[in-house]
Image (cartoon, helix red, strand yellow):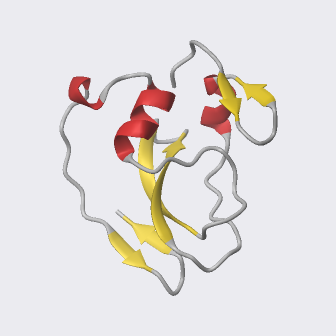
């Protein structure tokens, strides 16, 4: 997790350090508009995909892998090692398998 700087959470008017953001769990939310998003998994120390419901949840949620890596890991994606994984999405159950 990147330890420098601060993140301003729009709409709430609070400031959270990236280290705190890194510890937030993945939260899917409670609506029915399922979309692919990325979060930082503190146990794996890496950004992982998940299915976001479209509302609620927390701020450990990013539109793109690169955005997650830049904000959380603190590295631009070009500096990271390439990796391959298979992503299986079960939209009915809202689960993601890698």
Say which residue appears at 40% left-offset and 34% top-offset. Answer: 69
Q: Position of residue 51 (x, y in %)?
A: 50, 67
Q: Nearer the viewer, residue 28 or 67?
A: 67
Q: In front here: 92 or 6?
A: 6
Where residue 11 appears, as percent x and y from the top left, is: 77, 42
> Going by the picture, which residue comes out furthest to the right?
13
Q: Is residue 32 above or below residue 5?
A: below
Residue at screen point 44% across, 22% down: 74
Most extreme residue toward the bottom is 92
Q: Quadrant of residue 60?
A: top right
Q: In percent of the image, x 34 and y 62: which residue is there?
A: 98
> Which quarter of the picture shows residue 46?
top left
Horizontal relation, residue 28 to residue 70: left or right: right
- Name the image quarter holding residue 77: top left
Drawn side of residue 3 relative to residue 79, left or right:
right
The residue drawn where x is 20% and y is 44% is 83
């Amino acid at each position: 997790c990147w330890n420098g700087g601060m993140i301003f959470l729009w709409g709430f008017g609070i400031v959270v350090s990236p280290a705190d953001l890194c510890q937030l769990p993945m939260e899917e939310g409670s609506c029915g508009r399922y979309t692919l998003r990325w979060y930082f998994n503190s146990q794996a120390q890496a950004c992982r995909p998940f299915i976001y419901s479209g509302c609620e949840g927390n701020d450990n949620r990013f539109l793109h892998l690169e955005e997650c890596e830049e904000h959380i890991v603190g590295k631009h994606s070009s500096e990271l090692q390439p990796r391959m994984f298979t992503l299986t999405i079960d939209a009915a159950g809202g689960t993601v398998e890698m």
